[in-house]
Amino acid sequence: MSDDIILDVKDIGLHFGGVKAVDGLSFSIKKNQIHALIGPNGSGKTTTLNLITGVYQPQWGEANFDGKNISRMPRADIAKIGITRTFQNLRIYNTLTVLEHVLVGDYINSNTGFFSSVFKLPAGRLDEKRAVSKSMELLEKVGLADKAHSLATSLSYGQRRLLEIGRALAVKPKLLFLDEPAAGMSSNEIEQLIELLRLLKKEGMTIMIIEHRMKLVMNVADWIVVLNYGKKIAEGTAEEIQNHEEVIEAYLGKSHQKISVA
Amino acid sequence: MDIQIVMQQVISGLAIGCIYGLIALGYSLIFNAVDVVNLAQGSFVMVGAFVYGASFVRSYGWPAFPAFAGLIIVMAVFGMVCEFFFYRPLRYAHVRTKLVALLALSMLLNNLALIIWGPYPMGLEGPFGTKVLSIKGATILYQNIYIIAITILLLILQFYIFFHTTLGKVLRAVAQDKDTASLMGIEANQAVSFTFAYSSILAGIAGMLIAPVFTIGTGLSQLGFMGFGACIIGSFTNVSGALIGGIILGLFEMFSASYISSLYKSAIVYLLIIAFLLMRPQGLLGKKEEVSGL
Amino acid sequence: MFKKERNIALAIIFLILIITPIFDRAPYHIFVLNMVAINIILVMALNFILGFAGQVFLGTVGFYAIACYSTSLLTVNYGLSFWQAVPFTIIVTSILSLILGLPTLKLKGFYLALMSSGFIYIVLDILRNWKSFTGGVWGIMGIPRPFIGTTLVRSDLHFYFIAITITLCLAIFAVLIEDSKFGRAFKAVRDDQLSSEMLGINSHMTKVLAFVMCGIYTGFAGSLFASLQGFVSPEMYTFELNATYMCMLVVGGLGSVPGAVLGATVLTITTELLRFLREKYLTFYALLIIIVLIYMPGGIITYVYQIIGRLFSLKNKPSQKEEINVR
């Protein structure tokens, strides 16, 4: 195993009743690269993500992060060692403002105690100041700084996706999973997202996106893993995947056409 | 331990357990249909006892059978009315909100009962009075046998309704899978309304059966807790589990009162339920859930 | 959101509560005011667990009973003064909430709801039956009033000033918690538990913290009530009493500190006005909960916020301090 592998998924699997949602899947994620997990609807992409982040527990197999087995770890601990994610069906907090969302993401990076935080003692005040300025920086990065004090429910669909990314970034993850980040986004917002992903990569972040939109995937991903019926059918660079027989079949049925990139 | 006394206790434990089982069935039907535990189920039992015992039998002097038929009609309508006014407006609200609303419903029913039927508990004689059956020196109340017999009859009837009628198909479909039910073209609101009606009938019958054992009063609404305990011990999602849980709870209650302490009876039962809840929350017959606590 | 409105609302309500005795010193009214202060603390306690952490816990009255009895036993049987008994009472209720909360707060919502309703029955069972310790159905009498310096606080009016001061401090404390990172964590777990866990928040411990805060507040309320009343007996700690506190919170505004304060104030006074109905006033409470849940889920405090926003012409613009951070 080479040193730059950050997450190593080995033969992971989960069956719901008779349905093999994820069936003996193995792949690895390399440091500082953008990976993509693609596949037709119902191919087990989100379930895979749920298995890695502890939403479900795998029935067999394991995932190793930085050499540590993270399967069966409590969910919050998985975030603490550096993995976080966004959600396909947005999960924002109805009663919190945009800024507060990012501050919640920062929660585990603040180590002030109860009294110091509640009574705004010097240490608590300093920490809150750090958290707010850090969060504003992140909001600037995802382009929501001007909305900082509005309720998150007032945001558009695409903006909510960006907010979820900002909130996840506040955790300071080493590995970030984005579940269909472009769903419901306008083309402007997608451009913004692509730029953001490139910026994050430049800053050293490791990312895996789960996406439907080929344009986005082919544009940003360094390495693509393709799933079908819970199994890996191919992996490789964008170019390799576009010409892969089985992938084309899975996406377009038997008619042999090149996957449209447009 | 005297074998006759043990046998008497087993029979009364079984009888009370059957009633807990009936209440539990009502819980599990509504839970499976709408994913919310009807916190007012105990009050439904109380309403059933009052309507049957206090109004039909004591005030109007109806004989047992017409009173029973009347009870079923009243409880069905009552369940639908409760669903329409207290559940339906909140069906898209958070579970937390629904729970608080159902709690308020339970409080409302208890206090309306105080206003309508007065604050004094009433006794009611069952159809067999205090007559007893003697088998080899053990004296067994006919009322207890009656309870067990009615429960068995009801289960057979329920089995028939569930598997051989359209109404049963609707109830089953809703209880098992709401999405499939809506695919089958079953109007969700109507199905939920039926479910409330049916579970309210079950609660009413439980109230009718329990009235001669205890007295009729608002205290009966606390039985909802025992029905809930039966669901925890048996299963929330499995119909036979609810009944078995009820019987286990009834027997346990009877024996702990006799051999451990009668003063702390409810505390001991509570500890049993909480032990089950913490160690096997899916119940004896339930399947383990994939995602918990969300 | 609404931080300014919240602070102004709290200031106004407490100002009214503090100056009322200047105009009205009828003994009965002062007694009602004392009950208002105690109920505010209890409803704020409920707000921690139901409003902030979103857990349907129905056993607050069980804690309340234990708090009242702790103070009574400590003062009457063990000879402690009121001020010595208060911290011990709070230790008792907070440890108890920890013991009860650690296992039960892992459970799904409705499990917790029903288990906690059973908790009240257990507490009552023990209070009624453990005669040698709790005095059985007769309860405990002769609970002392607090001393200030060397003078005993005999009059209800003076007691009220102590009670309202404690209530005010606890309200400020609640607001400070709401504004801290812990307050945000409560709401995050309440609004979406799964995504909060994905951000590394331990949802279980967050709920336990809210629960312990609930225990601590109930401890204060219990101490004050035992001392105000002078005796305790098991009869008053009913499931219905719990429902009235829930009604106060829902009507005032779930998850809002001034909502809890306003709900407790308004409904405690309403209850007194409806005394002639005896227990039937609970019917009114039950209907009120359902109507508020359906037609104004934010409670009356949302209207108060609107009025305050208009009166003080507050627009929710970023405050200056936060603007500095933007740059």
Image (cartoon, rainbow, N blue to C red):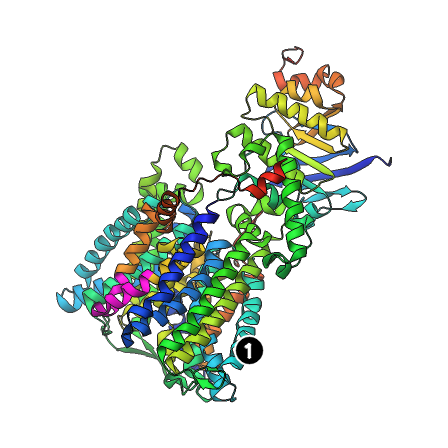
Find residue B201 and report its image quarter.
Answer: bottom left
> Is A172 situated above or below C7?
above
Q: Is residue C18 magenta?
A: no
**Kind of residue at badge 1:** Phe
> Is C91 situated above or below B174?
below
> Is A18 situated above or below B245?
above
Quadrant for the N terminus of chain A in the image: top right
- Residue A111 in the figure: left or right of residue C224: right
Residue pictured at 58% horizontal, 20% vertical: A188
Specify the segment rendered in magenta: C266-283
Q: Residue B283 versus residue A44: which sits nearer the camera?
A: A44
- Residue B25 in the figure: left or right of residue C108: left
Q: Locate residue B148, reporting x and y percent.
A: 35, 66
Q: Is residue B40 visible?
A: no
Q: Locate residue B230, reporting x and y percent.
A: 44, 62
Q: Locate residue C86, reporting x and y percent.
A: 51, 77
Residue pictured at 81% horizontal, 44% vertical: A67
Q: Chain of mark 1?
A: C
Q: Locate residue B236, reporting x and y percent.
A: 46, 54
Q: Residue C273 versus residue A120: which sits nearer the camera?
A: A120
- Residue A105 in the figure: left or right of residue C149: right
Q: Secondary structure at mark 1?
A: helix
Q: Is residue C18 visible?
A: yes
Q: Residues within 10 Å of mark 1 (few under 14, many from 20)?
A: some
Magenta stretch: helix, strand or loop mostly: helix
Quadrant for the C terminus of chain A in the image: top right
Residue at label 1?
C88
Q: Residue C282 versus residue B148: which sits nearer the camera?
A: C282
Find residue A227 and report its image quarter.
Answer: top right
Q: Is residue C279 magenta?
A: yes
> Is A22 situated above or below B49?
above
